[in-house]
Image (cartoon, helix red, strand yellow):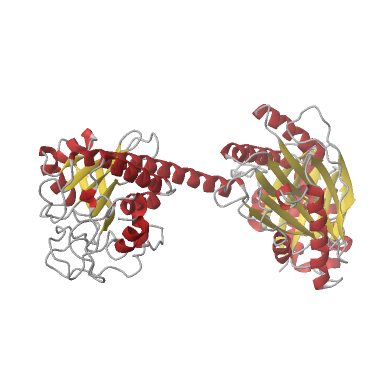
Amino acid sequence: MPAQARTGEQDAGSEHAQSSTAGAFDPGGHRPRPAPQGVPGQPGTGVDETRPAAELSSAAVPGPPGGAERRSGRPRPPGPAAMRRDGDRLRFVGAATRRIARGIDLDEIVMGLCRATVPTFSDAILVYLRDPLPVGDERPTGPLLLRLRRTDRIPEDQDTDGGTLPALQVQSDLSTAAELCEVRVGSALAEVLRGVRPVFADSAQALGALPELLGEGRAVPGGQRAILAPLRGRRRVIGAAVFLRRPDRHAFEADDLLVAAQLATHSALGIDKAVLYGREAYIADELQRTMLPETLPRATGVRLASRYLPAAETARVGGDWYDAIPLPGSRVALVVGDVMGHSMTSAAIMGQLRTTAQTLAGLDLPPQEVLHHLDEQAQRLGSDRMATCLYAVYDPVSHRITIANAGHPPPVLLHLGGRAEVLRVPPGAPIGVGGVDFEAVELDAPAGATLLLYTDGLVESRLRDVWTGIEQLRERLAATAQLTGPDHPPPLEALCDEVLDMLGPGDRDDDIALLAARFDGIAPSDVAYWFLEPEDATPSRARRLARSALERWGLTDLNDAVELLVSEVVTNAVRYATRPITLRLLRTDVLRCEVGDDVPQLPRLRQARATDEGGRGLYLVNKLARRWGATRLSTGKVVWFELNQT
């Protein structure tokens, strides 16, 4: 029969799909009509697929014999039993294994097995998988449980004569025997699974194994009309498949055991692959979640926004990162970097470099020194560990920003009037080259301006070089700023979205990390700063200076608390300092007090004993202040605390 005729005649008889939570085979009961265009994929499998009936003819194997086509009255094409020639079996196995291999996740592979075998090889199939499925070399614990993952069958026509499929009603209750089977040690089912080879239902091994798997009272076709095939992965049995033929069809033949073995082997290996892929995707998601900051800090005098886009949904982990790190003196470090490569290794190196950068920032090192130490760290990680990085420190009091670059694309500064400027920063060599010096530049950071740090995935692709992309980014920022007028900068979050909208279909070749900083700064009128000699009268002088600043700012309600806390912190500094100490008050949304000295040892909060004469200063600070902390500097330390203004 020509292939075209075969395909057309199968349209009415080969439509099938059966959910594992619906009735599968019910003799003597109502027999469902076939779906007119194909039956959607099962719910819960993660695949929403309507299967055309003509697709079943791809194996070039005749269909089931007997009966008549209900709509046209023509004789039904021959069924699975017509697969008698070795060439038919080879073509079927080739087409079936290709279909199974196309699946990526677990549900696609199981569906591929069911759709490839029904109705070409069998009239129905049940697939059981281990619960839970082991991953790689993971050693399973507990009893071996098999759970029904999917069923598939040919729907019965209401006016079809002949036998019906055996009663294998699949209950929706997952605790029933049909849904879940515990393989007992030494049982008949355990012996069949250990033997790995498929067996007929009438064999001595299967007579006890099938009732154990399907549940007691479940009728099984007699003779050689059922095949039980263990699914063995790379290291262990991970499930079983049951192939069934109706009593009015030809029984399986001995060579069909080889076909079942091939299908079971390819399916099991595919399932192993899917489980490993799922674990890798989970690890990728976890890496991505932990390597990047969950939230950006609330820094004084600057507002922050960020975006991260992976290169593709299937490659969610890369080497791009960004960070914002609060520094002493109300400053903030802005970092963006890009480790070369797209792999788990790149993500791991990125995490190490980001952690190193955070540690170095805590030491308050200059930007060029931070890049120098990152370069040394990259060389310790390996000779081929390369990365680009840009490290900037913004001071909201002086309205200045200090930037050092290690082979990274230059930042873009969007001024309040709408002018976008590519900052002239020495490019430097990438991190990991070794033996190079990094240079830092200090630039103005006017209030209302926005600094944009990004990775090369935003401006470089197969369709454009990096400098063309930077120019397009500059033009996009300037055009966006024109929409809000010269006196109002564009909203920060909306600006990030506008920047990402410049990406075209061919521009997603690399990860993209984006960090935007809006400089608000701190006005000079909101800053009070003094140098104090470390002498006995200094604490009382510090109290008077703090009181006068609060009166000037209209914050006299805070006089008592500020005087007490300033006195305690300054007294501790005077006790150990050898050089002049600094006292600074900052008025923003909170009142912040900072006391600096030349002693590197950080104070520790402790519970003073009743007989101690001191040790209660930090206890008072901890009780009265909104927040407090201490940071070590290259020249000593800074102890700070914050109070709410209301």
Q: Residue at x 29, y 43 (%)?
A: 89
x, y (%) of residue 407? 79, 40
Inspect this view and state whether residue 33 appears.
yes
Work out whether 433 lies above or below 247: above
x, y (%) of residue 42? 34, 61
Work out whether 194 lies above or below 510: above
- In the picture as drawn, the residue positioned furthest to the front comes out as 1
Q: Residue at x 14, y 42 (%)?
A: 206
Quarter of the figure with the N terminus: bottom left
- Going by the image, does 425 lie left or right of 513? right
Residue toward you, 133 or 616: 133
- Going by the image, does 625 lie left or right of 24? right
x, y (%) of residue 301? 78, 59
Q: How many marks?
A: 0
Residue toward you, 643 or 513: 513
Work out whether 340 lies above or below 99: above
x, y (%) of residue 536? 83, 44
Quarter of the figure with the C terminus: bottom right
Residue toward you, 566 or 527: 527
